[in-house]
Image (cartoon, rainbow, N blue to C red):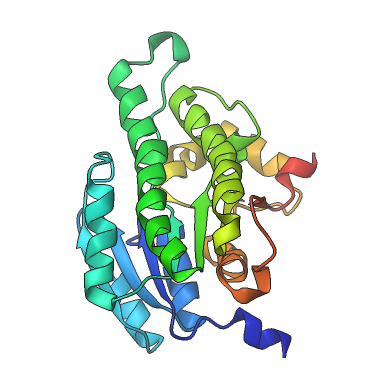
Amino acid sequence: MILDDFKLNGKVAIVTGCNTGLGQGMACALAEAGADIFGVYRSTPGDTPLLIEKCGRRFEGIQADLSVPANAEDIVNKALDTYKHIDILINNAGIIRREDSINFSEQDWDDVLNTNLKTLFFLSQAAAKHFIRQKSGRIINIASMLSYQGGIRVPSYTASKSAVKGLTMTLANEWAPYGVTVNAIAPGYMETNNTTALRADKARNAAILERIPAGRWGTPDDMKGAVVFLASNAAAYVNGFTLAVDGGWLSR
């Protein structure tokens, strides 16, 4: 039955930035589909462990600073030590810095690129070494509308998310022969910590809503179907693709 292909029973997923927002929503979705979760969080896991356990699944995790790419291998090794295998990697964690490009600092550039791109690559590399040995694995990167557009006052974020889309294709090309798929999800304008300032700006909020055909900001629940699909056997022949979950934003 086709619905069986969406089940993730027996799978283990690493989810970065699992404590809030989209990361928490995706971790819960994977657990609802049957996966156990290894969460990565910067400070605390919040209420994510409780939500996962309510789904009848196991949650373990690690506190890590993802602006330090050297932490990537330790994260994957800890997940393997805990669960003995991993099957899914969700590269969700990301940061944003807002400033006019003419005034943008090198520190803000490096912080965003390290977290959003460099650590994402080395986490993918570390996970892929295991996936290639077991001849299966799913990597799902979180891209952005700014993988397609320029944005305003977010030069490092735009650069990082454009690169995530391209890197997704590159890694898919290299690792597909080993049963590994690498895809991305590009969320539209979502109600998360990263968009608090935008939603608080009445003029900017109104302009954004006017452009979204669905007429609303997205929520973490809107990501659930996409992440379960790409993590499951139902997407076994989907590779190197970035799926927009945007309420129709890119159609205008």
Residue 56 appears in which quarter of the rendering? bottom left
Query: Quadrant where the N terminus lies?
Result: bottom right
Q: Residue at x 60, y 56 (%)?
A: 176
In this view of the protein, can residue 29 be seen by the observer? Answer: yes
Q: Vertically, is 8 above or below 18? A: below
Q: Left of 215 or right of it: where is 143? A: left
Residue 171 is situated, as x and y percent measured from the top left of the image, at 54, 46
204, above or below 10, in the image: above
Task: Locate residue 81, reporting x and y percent.
Answer: 22, 71
Quarter containing the C terminus: top right
Q: Position of residue 7 (x, y in %)?
A: 57, 83
The percent coordinates of residue 77 (x first, y second) are: 24, 62
Please tell me whether residue 206 is drawn above or below residue 10 in the rendered image: above
**Which of the 4 image quarters holds residue 100?**
top left
User: Based on the displayed image, in which of its 4 quarters is residue 237 positioned?
Assistant: bottom right
In this picture, residue 231 sits left or right of residue 103: right
Q: Nearer the viewer, residue 97 or 161?
A: 161
Count of numbered circles in the view: 0
Residue nearest the observer in this picture, 175 or 220: 175
Residue at image position (29%, 60%) is 76
Which is more toward the observer, 116 or 24? 116
Q: Would residue 21 be visible to someone looking at this image?
A: no
Q: Is residue 194 left or right of residue 172?
A: left
- Residue at the spot 55% in from the left edge and 24% down from the top edge: 152
Identify the residue at the far right of this view. Answer: 252
